[in-house]
Structures are given as structure tokens and as C-alpha cells.
Amino acid sequence: MYVAPLVVIVVAAVSLTGLWGLHRMTAVSPEPLKVLPFQSGWCPQEHALSRYHARWYLATLVFLAFDVEMLFMYPWAVVVADVGASAVIEMFLFLGALLLAVVWAWREGALRWA
């Protein structure tokens, strides 16, 4: 009754154990130079997230807003001829909401690069 699931579990366990063993036999021992960080082997001086100023998060939100806009505009362009004027009105309402988001981002300084 439970033979098939048990066979699958045993085959998966044996396969994973075999692959792990093959990896351990063929792996090159780590050299000190190869385990150092990527940037020329130098140790990082600061945390990875501390490099980015908070203003980039607002710029990212503006980018995502326009990216999502294009995501919605393509299917709209495909069906706008079939749906008619209501689709045009809906798209202008959507673009109006995005315009409000851009005005907010502009006011918050997300479009200022210096």
C-alpha cells in the first residue's frame, strides 16, 4: 500500500547521499585566497547594506511604479479596441494615480540625484 512512496523516498535519499559523496570526493580543498571576499580578496570595510543612501529606496519605488505601469499597459493595449471607451477611462484613471505617485516622489526628493 505504501510501497511506492517508500521506494521514492529511498531512491531520493540514496541519490542525494551518492551525489553528496561524489562532491566530497571531487571537491578541491579551499585555498585561503579563494575563500576571501570577491572584491580583489579584500575584506569588506562596512556592512553591505550600509553603502546605500535612503534616497535610492525612493528612486527604486518610482522605477517599480513605471515598471508596473508597463506591465498593465501591454494587456490593456491588446484589448482596448474590443472593450471601448471604458478601457480608455480606466487607463487614464490608472495613469492619474501614477502621476500622483510621481508628484509625491518629486516632493519627497526621490528625483533629486545630488
Image (spheres, rainbow, N blue to C red):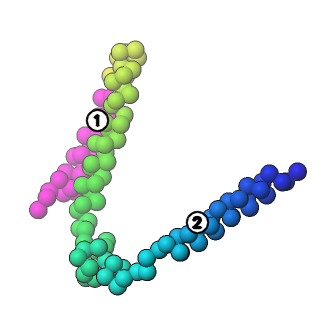
Question: What residue is rendered at 11% in x and 62% in y?
Answer: 114
Quick one: SS at disc 2? helix
Q: Residue 36: x and y, percent? A: 32, 80
Q: Amino acid at mark 1?
A: Gly
- In magenta, the rendered stretch is 90-114
Q: Residue 32: x and y, percent? A: 35, 85
The answer, for residue 76, to whether it is visible in the render is: yes
Q: Give residue 90's quadrant in the image.
A: top left
Q: Give residue 3's quadrant in the image.
A: bottom right
Figure label count: 2
Q: CA distance from mark 1 to mark 2?
A: 56 Å
Question: What residue is rendered at 58% in x and 65% in y?
Answer: 19
Question: What residue is rendered at 36% in x and 34% in y?
Answer: 72
Question: What residue is rendered at 27% in x and 49% in y?
Answer: 62
Residue neighbourhood size for the residue with mark 2, other residues' Cα within 10 Å, grouped as few (<14), some (14–19), many (≥20): few
Closer to us: 95 or 37: 37
Quick one: SS at disc 1? helix
Magenta stretch prevailing secondary structure:
helix
Q: Amino acid at mark 2?
A: Leu
Location of residue 86 with respect to 66 vertically, above or below: above
**Residue that extends furthest to the left in the rendered view of this protein:** 114
Q: Residue 111: x and y, percent? A: 17, 53
Q: Which mark is residue 96?
A: 1
Q: Which mark is residue 27?
A: none
Residue 107 falls left or right of residue 6: left
Q: Give residue 88's quadrant in the image.
A: top left
Location of residue 13 with respect to 59 vertically, above or below: below
Residue denoted by label 2:
19
Disc 1 and disc 2 in contact, CB within 8 angstroms: no
Q: Residue 69: x and y, percent? A: 32, 38
